[in-house]
Amino acid sequence: MKKFAINPKRCDRSPYCAVRRECPSRAIQEVDGVFYIDMNVCRGCGLCVKACPREAVEESAS
Ligand code: SF4
């Protein structure tokens, strides 16, 4: 399964985050204003990569 991560340097932490809306698994979580992908529920579909207008979601190596 592919793995993805949110690059905090690109993410603008918008309350209207398109990635949060589009993720079918509701895997985008937030702690202290920082968004991250909960890999316990992510299904590796990759929709988040296309959904982010800031290209903040990247495929991770591990
Ligand atoms: S890969 Fe799919 S399930 Fe995982 S965070 Fe992205 S949109 Fe959600």
Image (spheres, rainbow, N blue to C red):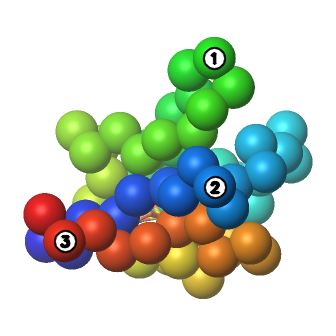
Could you classify mark 3 by the number of other residues whose Cα lies within 10 Å: few (under 14), some (14-19), or many (20 or more)? Answer: few
Q: Residue furthest top?
A: 32
Residues at badges 2 and 1 in contact (C-beta under 8 Å)?
no
- Residue 52 spot, x, y in % from top left: 68, 70
Classify mark 3 as within 8 Å of ligand 1 or not, answering yes or no. no
Q: Which of marks 2 and 1 is nearer the N terminus?
A: 2
Residue 47 left/right relative to 20: left
Quarter of the N terminus within the rendering: bottom left
Classify mark 2 as within 8 Å of ligand 1 or not, answering yes or no. no
**Residue under pointer 2:** 9
Which residue is rendered at x = 50% and y = 56% of the image?
A: 6
- Give SS at disc 3: loop
Can you say whether 44 is above or below 29 in the image?
below
* Three-letter amino acid code of the residue under disc 3: Ala
Q: Which residue lies furthest to the front in this view?
A: 9
Q: Which of marks 3 and 2 is nearer the N terminus?
A: 2
> Which labelled disc corresponds to residue 32?
1
Q: Earlier in the sequence, mark 3 or mark 1?
A: 1
Which residue is rendered at x = 19% and y = 71% of the image?
A: 61
Q: Which of marks 3 and 2 is in front?
A: 2
- Give SS at disc 2: loop
- Residue 15 spot, x, y in % from top left: 85, 39
Can you say whether 55 is above or below 20 in the image?
below
Q: In which quarter of the image is ligand 1?
A: bottom left
Q: Can residue 22 be seen in this view?
A: no
Residue 53 left/right relative to 59: right
Residues at badges 3 and 2 in contact (C-beta under 8 Å)?
no
* Three-letter amino acid code of the residue under disc 1: Asp
> Which labelled disc corresponds to residue 61?
3
- Label 3 to label 1: alpha-carbon separation: 25 Å
Which residue is more in the foreground, 54 or 15?
Answer: 54
